């Protein structure tokens, strides 16, 4: 009995058996034509679709890499805030974060948040703004929501004012997160050591 050691060999044997059954059911003298074989045509169609999908993925990866290079150059020149985001820049943000070893790129996140809040670039389209909810991280979305609310509360606030307010909010949040409560001093007369310690805390506040 023939033993097939690989899945490919078993699949080939199954295909030969299928062809044998196909010819046995056909009119005697029929010549096999792969162009008329629905199974073969379906496989060719699936292979072509898979190849097209792989090619599209490679093109998209190349586009993201090129756009990431361009944005990185703008960052080094200090002119990132003078450009507007494009469709797909959410993936470019992820690429820049990956290149930085996973560390958050605050300037890129702030740039996208401000563009989302101010409806700049491709975010002029409501569909793009709605799609961003599933593409950007919660901190970026929260930053954008904060800037949008500031713009609503302070009509006419310019770009720099909105960005400064957002940075100030993030700085306060980081300070609150780092704040460590100090133990309360004992009640009663304070010793000189405790008094000096509290004075140091007051000076450093």
Image (tube, rainbow, N blue to C red):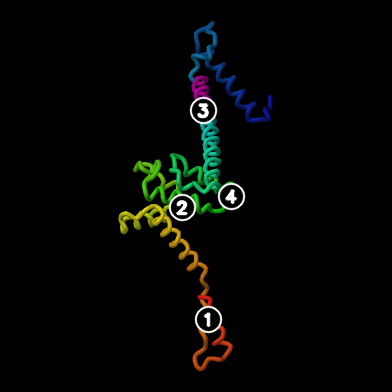
Q: Quadrant of the N terminus?
A: top right
Label 4 CA crowd tier, 10 Å (few <14, some 14–19, many 20+): few
Q: Are marks 3 and 4 in contact (CB under 8 Å)?
A: no
SS for dot 1? loop
Closer to the N terminus: mark 3 or mark 1?
3
Tell whether label 2 touches label 3 (CB within 8 Å): no
* Residue drawn 44% across the image and 48% down it: 112
Q: Which residue is mark 4?
A: 100
Q: CA distance from mark 4 to mark 1?
A: 39 Å
Give the residues in magenta.
Answer: 39-50
Q: Looking at the image, is 151 positioned above or below residue 93?
A: below
Residue 146: x %, y % from top left: 38, 57
- The span from disc 2 to disc 1 (Cα, nearest Å) is 37 Å
Q: Is residue 40 above or below residue 160?
A: above
Question: Which image quadrant is residue 87 in?
Answer: top left
Question: Which of the two discs, 3 and 4, sits closer to the camera?
Answer: 4
Farthest residue, direction bottom: 189
Do residues under tags 3 and 1 come within 8 Å of each other at their CB atoms?
Answer: no
């Amino acid at each position: 009995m023939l033993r097939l050691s690989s899945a490919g060999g078993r699949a080939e044997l199954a295909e030969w058996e299928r062809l044998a059954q196909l010819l046995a059911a056909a009119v005697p003298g029929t010549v096999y034509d792969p162009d008329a074989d629905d199974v073969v045509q379906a496989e060719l169609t699936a292979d072509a679709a898979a190849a097209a999908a792989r090619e599209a993925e490679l093109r998209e990866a190349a586009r993201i890499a090129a756009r990431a290079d361009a944005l990185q150059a703008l960052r080094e020149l200090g002119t990132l805030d003078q450009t507007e985001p494009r469709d797909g820049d959410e993936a470019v943000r992820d690429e820049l974060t990956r290149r930085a070893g996973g560390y958050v790129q605050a300037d890129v996140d702030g740039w996208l948040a401000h563009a989302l809040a101010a409806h700049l670039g491709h975010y002029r389209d409501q569909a793009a703004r709605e799609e961003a909810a599933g593409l950007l991280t919660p901190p970026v979305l929260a930053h954008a929501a904060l800037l949008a609310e500031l713009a609503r509360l302070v009509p006419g606030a310019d770009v720099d004012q909105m960005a400064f307010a957002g940075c100030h909010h993030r700085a306060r949040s980081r300070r609150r997160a780092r704040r460590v409560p100090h133990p309360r001093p004992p009640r009663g007369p304070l010793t000189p050591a405790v008094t000096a310690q509290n004075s140091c805390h007051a000076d450093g506040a």
